Amino acid sequence: MQFLPHTKSPSPRTPSESTTPSTISPSQPLAHQVGGHEGVQTTADGSLLIKPTLPLELTFYQSVTAIPALAPLQPWIPQFLGTLRLEGQRTAEGEVVQGVPSGLEEQQDEYSIPCCLVLENLSHPFLRPNILDVKLGTVLYDEDATAEKRARMEITARSTTSHKTGIRLTGFQVYDNTTAKPITTPKSYGKSITPADLPTGIACVFPTAFDGAGTSGLPAHTLSPMLDTLTDAVRAVRDAVASVEIRMVGGSLLVLYEAEWDRAAEGVEWLKAHPGQFAEEEDEDEDEDEEEGEGEGEGEDDEMSKKAGPPFVVKLIDFAHTWLKPGEGPDEGVLKGLDTLIELLDGRREEVRASLQPRSHTA
């Protein structure tokens, strides 16, 4: 199998290549989606994600395990389980309609191939996942983009934080401690802020709650060690990206962490018991236990029965415009974005750590 450099033609796939059954349990819309195209589904139990795909993204996932040059990325992308073909739906008249996934009607040409990726659902192990989607890179257009699109995307990059910093906060959700419901910040926020606003944005993603006060966030004594290891994980992602010769347009880094206090504290203890390990190194038995649980509709007792594990996950996602560039080095725009994110996380770590220091009292 060869990873074709930036080809738009579909990659042939024989039945023997499929790693998933021809049918799968009923699906439902992904509840925890803060970025990307609509139309992503999950299985009823919440463990798998079904994502409409383009040929280049499918080729990328097929190639990561086959091409040694891409091996450093493997721990930092979602687990790829195979593909599914869209079967369509039967109308009241009995006619089978080969439809486009809900929410993608306006993008039917782009998603015309009836093929979906089957990936692990990264949010499934979490009881209350706080999620950040960070768009990476300074270039927002493909090599074969038209002059009109290049000009439009350059304006977009320069009018947002992408051009100067290599990142844009695509969207995020943070759970409210009082209602136990997520509060979502949309794409418009990330498009409206300046580089000077990014530290505030990161603080909104990683808020602290002091002595039970505040409507969102973890206690600082839980958030601080979690942020330390999470930042180390992002550094490891940066090292992996620096070692591969690819171009990644429109890709993101997805960060998820546990917002339920007890579970997050258990996760921090897990990190202490597994020093030097990051979220991609979960035990297989632990994954199996988690997949036996219910998805979004589960009760609190069922949720709390989930086995403890790492309190965060960091993964690269969205490879519809990713291709190899042998001999041309890594994607400097993506590296710039990861460096920016690491700097922002380091700043937030210092703020959270400072909040743990005893406050002096003046006479």
Image (cartoon, rainbow, N blue to C red):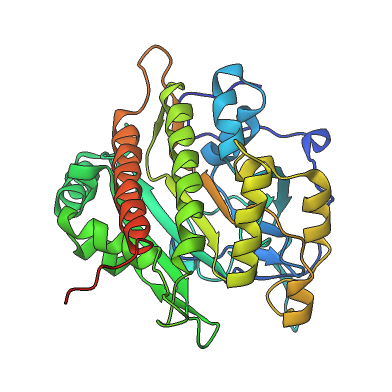
Toward the viewer: 319 or 207?
207
Residue 37 seen by the camera = no
Percent across and percent down for residue 70 are: 55, 24
Residue 305 relative to residue 86: left or right: right
How many marks the image carries: the answer is 0
Percent across and percent down for residue 31 are: 58, 72
> Where, quadrant-wise, is the N terminus in this rendering?
top right
In the depicted structure, whether residue 10 falls above or below residue 325: below
Residue 226 seen by the camera = yes
x 47%, y 60%: residue: 223
Toward the viewer: 329 or 268?
268
Q: Quadrant of residue 55?
A: top right
x 20%, y 65%: residue: 192
Residue 197 relative to residue 111: left or right: left
x 37%, y 40%: residue: 249
* Most distant residue in the bottom direction: 179
Percent across and percent down for residue 181 are: 53, 82
* Most distant residue in the front direction: 363
Q: Quadrant of residue 94?
A: bottom right
Residue 231 relative to residue 69: left or right: left
Toward the viewer: 177 or 210?
210
> Where, quadrant-wise, is the C terminus in this rendering?
bottom left
In the depicted structure, whether residue 39 falls above or below residue 280: below
Residue 315 relative to residue 47: left or right: left
